[in-house]
C-alpha cells in the first residue's frame, strides 16, 4: 500500500477504509488485595527492571519515573507484603544498587503465571469481542494526523 503524503490523504485513507485499526485485545491484570494494597502491571514491570538493571533509579528512568516515584512504589510493595521484595546491594563502582529478593522474584513469577492463565482462559472470548468491534478509524484520529504531519515535515 502506498503511504499517504498529506494529512488530507491520511484522512481520506482512514475514511475509505484503506487504513484500519486492527485491535489486538489483551488483558491487563491488577490484583487488589484490599484498600491501598494492589499489584498491577506497573509495579511488576518496575520490579523486573530493577532485576534487569540492578538499580531502582535506572528502573525508574526506563519507565519515565522520577527516582522518588519509583522508590515510593517499591516502598508501597514492601508495606503490602510480609517480606521485602527489593534489597539494597552495597558497594560497586557506582555505590551499590538494588536487587530483587527471592521473595520479590516469587511475587513476579506468581503475577506472570496468573496473567498467563487469564490470557489463555479468556482467549476465545477476547477473539469474540475483537471480532465484534466496529470497523472504524482509531478514536484519536487527530493524534494520528499530527504524527503524520510531523513525519511529513521531517521528511
Image (tube, rainbow, N blue to C red):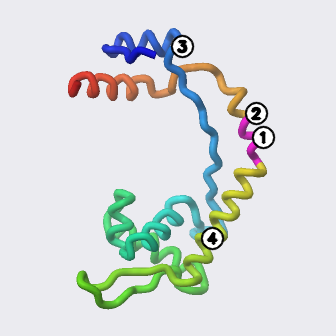
Name the one closer to the observer, 142 or 8: 8
Residue at the (51%, 9%) spot, across then down:
16
| Residue sitting farthest toward the bottom | 90
Q: Which residue is mark 3?
A: 17
| Magenta span: chief secondary structure | helix
Marks 2 & 1, CB-CB < 8 Å contact = yes
Work out which quarter of the rendered image holds the C terminus and state it: top left
Q: Which residue is mark 1?
A: 124
The quadrant in which residue 144 appears is top left
Image coordinates of residue 46 in percent, x first then y, are: 46, 66
Image coordinates of residue 21 in percent, x first then y, are: 54, 26
Image coordinates of residue 63 in percent, x first then y, are: 39, 58
Q: CA distance from mark 2 to mark 3?
A: 22 Å
Q: Which residues are magenta?
A: 122-128
Mark found first going from the N terminus, 4 or 3: 3
Q: Is residue 21 above or below residue 42?
A: above
Secondary structure at numbered mark 3: loop
Question: Dot 2 surroundings within 10 Å: few (below 14), some, or many (20 or more)?
Answer: few
Secondary structure at numbered mark 4: helix
Name the one closer to the observer, 32 or 138: 138
Amino acid at each position: 500500500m502506498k503511504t499517504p503524503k498529506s494529512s488530507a490523504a491520511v484522512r481520506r485513507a482512514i475514511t475509505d477504509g484503506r487504513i484500519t485499526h486492527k485491535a489486538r485485545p489483551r488483558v491487563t491484570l491488577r490484583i487488589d488485595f484490599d484498600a491501598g494494597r494492589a499489584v498491577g502491571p506497573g509495579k511488576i514491570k518496575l520490579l523486573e527492571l530493577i532485576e534487569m538493571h540492578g538499580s531502582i533509579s535506572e528502573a525508574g528512568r526506563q519507565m519515565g519515573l522520577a527516582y522518588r516515584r519509583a522508590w515510593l512504589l517499591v516502598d508501597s510493595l514492601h508495606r503490602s507484603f510480609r517480606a521485602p521484595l527489593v534489597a539494597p546491594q552495597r558497594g560497586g563502582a557506582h555505590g551499590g544498587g538494588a536487587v530483587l529478593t527471592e521473595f520479590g522474584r516469587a511475587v513476579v513469577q506468581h503475577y506472570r503465571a496468573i496473567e498467563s492463565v487469564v490470557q489463555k482462559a479468556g482467549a476465545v472470548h477476547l477473539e469474540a469481542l475483537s471480532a465484534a468491534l466496529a470497523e472504524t478509524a482509531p478514536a484519536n484520529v487527530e493524534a494520528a494526523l499530527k504524527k503524520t504531519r510531523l513525519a511529513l515535515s521531517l521528511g
